[in-house]
Image (cartoon, coloured by chain):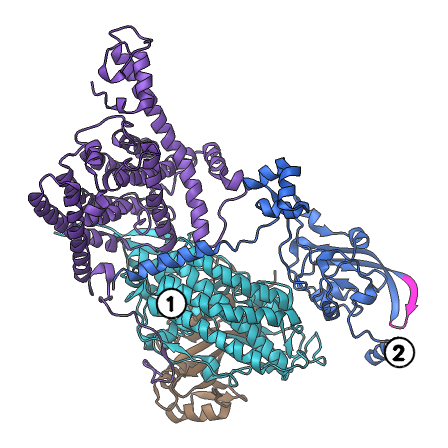
């Protein structure tokens, strides 16, 4: 006997505890099972790309801060690299190292947020999240020493960084680097071996690696699917060819793999920072000959970097003026959502939330 | 190190399997005829020596007298990137190019975004709706003539 | 073994509980008995004898100590510092502010310096309500006449009250943040200490001489 | 008339000074307020005093518990918890309560008004009713029902009605999800909960909670470890606490069945939930931890409350540490795990009570030893039954370490 039933349409979001901002999913449920899902976005659309056309190249940096607002440093980095390529600017080595240090710290901060909110989605009552905020706070304190701001940093500039870090910074960074591995172990003890976490996340939300590549999915999500693709390794920008680091790869391609890859990437990021601290040498952090108002030659440039969430790139077109003719962001958060519908169909409601959580999106970047 | 295909190099590669599909090249981009674009895209993805498995970025640029669609492609196996440019018609009127969603799934949201903000239609896209803005929004904000 | 991971997790939270909280309290900090005694500047027994009421309050966790959040000296805050004698009214800050929140009205003063004519600044309003503290106004000021401060408390009931008027800028003590002023940092300057700085100290460290300024001016012309 | 409360000196004083009856337990009579024939009034007044103390004590302890839980959670999460309002933040829940009372009471347009409004009351009633049978100390109880345990099991399942009423009445899909989950969960967990108590009943030989307490020469947590384990898990699920809080699953359903409630109606739900937590701790203490029985230097009521503390703290600790299970995992844990464990416990206890029908303390110790071995073995065995493929621990075989990332450089899978 089959029960006569009709699907229940539920709007998950835009105001929902677990949509990481203002994403809205219109989901059809059959009982607890998702039968269809439609993603509706745009609640945070601020028209950054249009705004960028009205601002000078340096002013646009402040807009990039506000795209992925939990990883402002990497946004700055991607934009600045694209501007440097467009204008043919050679960056100062010390500035590049500082950019790498800040970007890797930001990667740790972003992964901390991702994992913390993922566990929040699993119902862990914010305990892992609170622990991760504790360490993220240390990173933000470092950023405050670096550039006077914690979230919207505006620290990178074409040809280097805005200003050299104070002497105090190195001591604090050393303290952080010494303490952080123990904290990551702590998270692993709390989360990785927990049977509830394992049973909730293993084998759920599995994606085929080929499909992921075809759907432009990048970052930890792709690496959790067994594809060794990391732009820092395959297309080194800055001085990533001078540091050695490992790319954690998992073949399971499920939610647990996506979680674990992020945790291991934090360790690798720490290694990169360590090597940068060893290699950095005194010198100018910024080319004084690069003016505030840049006038790059007519042309276009695209530079993609390995952001915390995936390939983050800026496509800039210059018409020879002081502001970009066209500024297009390649938002990893948005493109990683391409397969969301396929991922969640057939899952129970609870797993739908967790699967969405493992994608690690930031609505500021999705909507821009 | 990821290597960018030079324009002429990639044009020669395309001409091998789709003669006459390209209309020219710039330093690092190939201009492809919109009519044959779908075949070219299929070849770019499936031919062993090219292997452009991923569409990194799809974007549109408003050049006042015409719209241009730019495809940044990436080959993971050869670690190379290539840039394809499509000119969609003359003038600002009916800007339309064929959708590549059947070739690269990743074009889905990017094409919708391009349609939403730039007003370039992608023919063959199964769900050509606005992405960022709401249904009923007038105009396409990223066009250069959109003021306000 | 199934179940062991659960107990490992319990252990982690227990250790965290024993290690104690890491919370930074703001705007004031609850102190226990020793903290209150230290705040009063007395030893604990003397504090107990001399101020029994305060001691009782402290013992039940009611005593608070005013405390500032620990802040980097580069913190970009809302209390802008303005050196009027250095400002020529060139309005670079207004021009390069990404949000256009600086309103500047000048009138001719007839004064002439090596760099050119100096204008009197009549209106110099900064609309903090829309400011995003990027600091570009400080970066572009050719005469280092504008600095950001470290203060961040400016909750107001009306939007209009969020505009810093020129009078307030003239009145206030100049305690610039060390952002974009590395020489202050090497001198160990703490913007929270409240020490007022003149422009000679707060200006950029490589201060150009009169001749250099003239030269630069001529070059750019 | 059952005058069991005369064991308690405080209530004996009230009763004896009121009543004129020459009850032997009152001892030497000094005076009596009421004339003869009004013993029933004295009984009533004493009963009302006990009820007042218990009900208000419960509501007051809810406030204390909310404060304590928040402070403790704060500690477990490396933060302070509420500390602003009152000494150590003790007045924070009071402020919350006042705020809750003065909040606007919103009834959604589409809601079924009667059902919607009745649900919070129906939610609150069972928790207050359970109060009646719990022996808070020697002689401190309202009624010594000879079916006390059965009464508790029957009454607590009433809260399911309230949850369904709330979910149905508010016409909210999230609330409906929560209600449906709660029903499924409660039906499933009633069974292991009732079964796990059977071992205790066999040893104590009575359904009355007072007799169960007096039978505990050795606390039953030692004699019945497996029963305790099952009962503890089932209670945790029944009162909707982590890791079984699927009914209000805040990350999935917003607030579950009380999504649409505001003001004091929401307050009643909250109150009932925390009251249920406290009462379940009380039941655990009465049934498994020997009630108020301990050394004599403190009154038995104090001992009872002191014994509740570790139970409550452990519940908060679990809440701080563990994520939530999925609803199907919660259900299969009950049906595939706990019920089997409960049956093992029943069989084991039956055999042991057959051997030692009226156990002395030494025999209880022997039972404890045997049952401990049985518990370890059966938990291990049932844990294996739950093994790979089954929902609670899908893809997690016993002894198998979870996967870890492999370093790159090895050949990458997928398309390169």
Q: Please, what secondary structure does the residue beneath circle 2 have?
A: helix
- The overriding secondary structure of the stretch rendered in magenta is strand
Give x and y (percent) for residue C71: 64, 59
Q: Which quarter of the rendering shows the N terminus of chain D?
A: top left
Most foreground residue, D225 or A346: D225
Write down which chain is painted brown. Answer: B
The disc label shown at residue C65, or none: none
Colour used to depict chain A in the structure image:
cyan
Q: Residue at x 33, y 50 (%)?
A: D242
Q: Residue at x 14, y 45 (%)?
A: D363
Host chain of mark 1:
A
Host chain of mark 2:
C
Question: Where on the picture, by quarter, is residue D257?
Answer: top left
Residue bounds of the magenta highlight: C109-115
Q: Residue at x 32, y 13 (%)?
A: D17
The residue singled out by tag 1 in the image is A259
Distance between the Cα atoms at labels 2 and 1? 61 Å
The disc label shown at residue C211, or none: 2
**B81 above or below B125?**
below
Does mark 1 fall on the same chain as mark 2?
no
Most foreground residue, B1 or B70: B1
Image check: D119 left or right of D225?
right
Exactly how many numbered labels are in the figure? 2
**D151 above or below B139?**
above
Give x and y (percent) for residue A268: 45, 76
Mark 2: few/some/many CA within 10 Å (<14, 14-19, 20+): few
Residue sitting farthest toward the left:
D354
Task: Look at the image and tell me whether residue A359 can be seen.
Answer: yes
Write down which chain is painted blue. Answer: C
Q: Please, what secondary structure does the residue beneath circle 1 have?
A: helix
Decide whether residue C112 is among the magenta residues.
Answer: yes
């Amino acid at each position: 006997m089959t029960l006569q039933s009709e699907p229940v349409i539920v709007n998950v979001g835009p105001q929902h505890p677990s949509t990481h901002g203002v994403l809205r999913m219109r989901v059809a449920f059959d009982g607890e099972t998702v039968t269809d899902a439609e993603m509706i976005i745009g609640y945070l659309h601020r028209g950054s790309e249009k705004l960028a056309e009205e601002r000078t190249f340096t002013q646009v940096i402040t807009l990039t801060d506000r795209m992925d607002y939990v990883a402002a440093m990497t946004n700055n980095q991607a934009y600045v690299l694209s501007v440097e390529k467009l204008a043919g600017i050679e960056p100062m080595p010390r500035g590049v190292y500082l950019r790498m240090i800040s970007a890797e710290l930001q990667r740790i901060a972003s992964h901390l947020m991702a994992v913390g909110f993922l566990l929040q989605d699993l119902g862990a009552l914010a305990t892992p999240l609170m622990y991760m905020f504790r360490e993220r706070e240390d990173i933000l304190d470092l950023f405050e020493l670096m550039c006077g701001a914690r979230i919207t940093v505006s620290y990178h500039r074409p040809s280097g960084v805005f200003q050299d870090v104070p002497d105090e910074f190195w001591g604090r960074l050393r303290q952080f680097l010494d303490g952080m591995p123990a904290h990551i172990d702590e998270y692993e003890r709390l989360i990785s071996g927990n049977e509830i976490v394992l049973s909730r996340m293993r084998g759920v939300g599995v994606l085929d690696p080929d499909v992921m590549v075809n759907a432009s999915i990048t970052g930890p999500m792709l690496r959790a699917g067994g594809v060794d693709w990391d732009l820092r390794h395959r297309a080194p920008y800055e001085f990533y060819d001078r540091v050695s680091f490992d790319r954690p790869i998992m073949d399971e391609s499920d939610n647990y793999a996506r979680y674990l890859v992020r945790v291991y990437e934090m360790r690798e990021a720490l290694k990169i920072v360590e090597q940068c601290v060893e290699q950095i040498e005194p010198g100018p952090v910024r080319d004084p000959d690069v003016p505030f108002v840049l006038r790059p030659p007519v042309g276009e440039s695209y530079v993609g970097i390995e952001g915390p969430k995936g390939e983050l790139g800026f496509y800039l077109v210059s018409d020879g003026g002081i502001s970009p003719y066209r500024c297009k962001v390649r938002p990893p958060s948005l493109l990683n959502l391409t397969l969301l519908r396929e991922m969640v169909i057939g899952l129970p409601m609870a797993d739908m939330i967790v699967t969405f959580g493992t994608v690690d999106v930031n609505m500021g970047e999705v909507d821009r | 190190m990821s290597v960018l295909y030079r324009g002429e190099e990639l044009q020669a590669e395309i001409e091998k399997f789709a003669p006459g599909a390209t209309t020219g090249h710039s330093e690092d981009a190939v201009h492809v005829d919109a009519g044959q674009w779908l075949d070219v895209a299929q070849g770019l993805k499936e031919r062993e020596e090219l292997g452009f498995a991923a569409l990194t970025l799809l974007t549109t640029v408003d050049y006042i007298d015409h719209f241009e669609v730019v495809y940044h492609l990436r080959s993971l196996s050869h670690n190379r990137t290539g840039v394809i440019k499509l000119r969609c018609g003359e003038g600002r009127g009916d800007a339309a190019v064929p959708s590549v969603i059947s070739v690269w799934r990743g074009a889905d949201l990017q094409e919708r975004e391009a349609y939403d903000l730039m007003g370039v239609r992608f023919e063959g896209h199964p769900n050509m709706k606005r992405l960022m803005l709401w249904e009923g929004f007038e105009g396409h904000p990223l066009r250069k003539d959109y003021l306000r | 073994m199934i179940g062991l991971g659960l107990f490992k997790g319990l252990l982690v939270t227990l250790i965290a509980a024993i290690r104690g909280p890491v919370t930074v309290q703001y705007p004031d900090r609850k102190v226990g008995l020793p903290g209150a005694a230290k705040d009063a500047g007395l030893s604990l027994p003397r504090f107990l004898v001399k101020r029994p009421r305060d001691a009782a309050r402290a013992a039940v966790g009611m005593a608070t100590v005013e405390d500032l959040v620990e802040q980097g000296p580069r913190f970009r805050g809302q209390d802008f510092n303005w050196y009027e004698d250095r400002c020529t009214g060139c309005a670079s800050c207004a021009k390069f502010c990404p949000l256009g929140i600086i309103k500047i009205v000048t009138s001719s003063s007839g004064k002439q310096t090596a760099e050119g004519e100096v204008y009197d600044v009549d209106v110099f309003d900064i609309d903090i309500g829309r400011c995003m503290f990027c600091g570009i106004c400080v970066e572009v000021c050719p005469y280092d006449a504008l600095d950001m401060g470290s203060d961040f408390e400016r909750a107001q009931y009306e939007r209009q009250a969020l505009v810093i008027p020129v009078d307030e800028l003239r009145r206030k003590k100049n305690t610039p943040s060390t952002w974009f002023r590395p020489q202050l940092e090497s001198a160990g300057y703490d913007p929270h200490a409240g020490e007022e700085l003149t422009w000679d100290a707060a200006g950029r460290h490589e201060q150009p001489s009169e001749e250099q300024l003239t030269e630069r001016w001529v070059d750019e012309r | 008339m059952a005058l069991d409360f005369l064991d308690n000196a405080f209530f004996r004083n009230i009763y004896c000074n009121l009543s004129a009856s020459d009850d032997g337990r009152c001892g030497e009579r000094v005076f009596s307020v009421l004339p003869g024939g009004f013993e029933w009034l004295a009984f009533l007044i004493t009963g009302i005093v006990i009820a007042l103390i218990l009900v208000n004590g419960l509501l007051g302890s809810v406030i204390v518990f909310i404060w304590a839980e928040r402070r403790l959670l704060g500690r477990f999460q490396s933060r302070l918890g509420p500390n602003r309002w009152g000494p150590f933040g003790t007045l924070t829940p009071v402020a919350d309560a006042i705020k809750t009372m003065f909040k606007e009471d919103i009834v959604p347009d589409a809601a079924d008004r009667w059902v919607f409004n009745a649900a919070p009351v129906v939610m609150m009633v069972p928790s207050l009713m359970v109060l009646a049978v719990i022996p808070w100390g020697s002689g401190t109880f309202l009624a010594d029902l000879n079916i006390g345990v059965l009464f508790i099991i029957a009454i607590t399942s009433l809260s399911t009605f309230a949850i369904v009423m709330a979910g149905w009445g508010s016409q909210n899909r999230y609330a409906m999800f929560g209600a449906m989950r709660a029903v499924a969960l409660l039906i499933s967990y009633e069974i292991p909960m009732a079964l796990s108590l059977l071992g205790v009943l066999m040893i104590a030989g009575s359904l009355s909670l007072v007799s169960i307490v007096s039978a505990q020469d050795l606390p039953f947590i030692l004699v019945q470890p497996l029963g305790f384990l099952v009962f503890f898990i089932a209670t945790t699920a029944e009162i909707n606490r982590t890791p079984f809080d699927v009914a209000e699953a805040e990350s999935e359903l917003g607030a579950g069945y009380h999504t649409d409630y505001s003001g004091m109606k929401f307050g009643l739900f909250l109150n009932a939930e925390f009251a249920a937590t406290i009462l379940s701790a009380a039941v655990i203490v009465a049934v498994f931890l020997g009630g108020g029985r301990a050394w004599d230097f403190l009154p038995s009521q104090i001992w009872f409350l002191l014994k509740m503390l570790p139970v409550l703290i452990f519940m908060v600790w679990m809440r701080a540490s563990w994520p939530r299970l999925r609803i199907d995992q919660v259900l299969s844990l009950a049906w595939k795990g706990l019920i089997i464990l409960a049956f093992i416990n029943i069989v084991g206890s039956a055999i042991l009570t057959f051997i030692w029908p009226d156990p002395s303390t030494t025999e209880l110790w022997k039972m404890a030893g045997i049952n401990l071995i049985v518990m370890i073995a059966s938990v291990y065995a049932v844990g294996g039954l739950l093994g790979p493929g089954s929902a609670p621990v899908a893809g997690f075989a016993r002894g198998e370490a979870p996967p870890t990332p492999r370093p790159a450089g090895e050949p990458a899978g997928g398309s390169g």
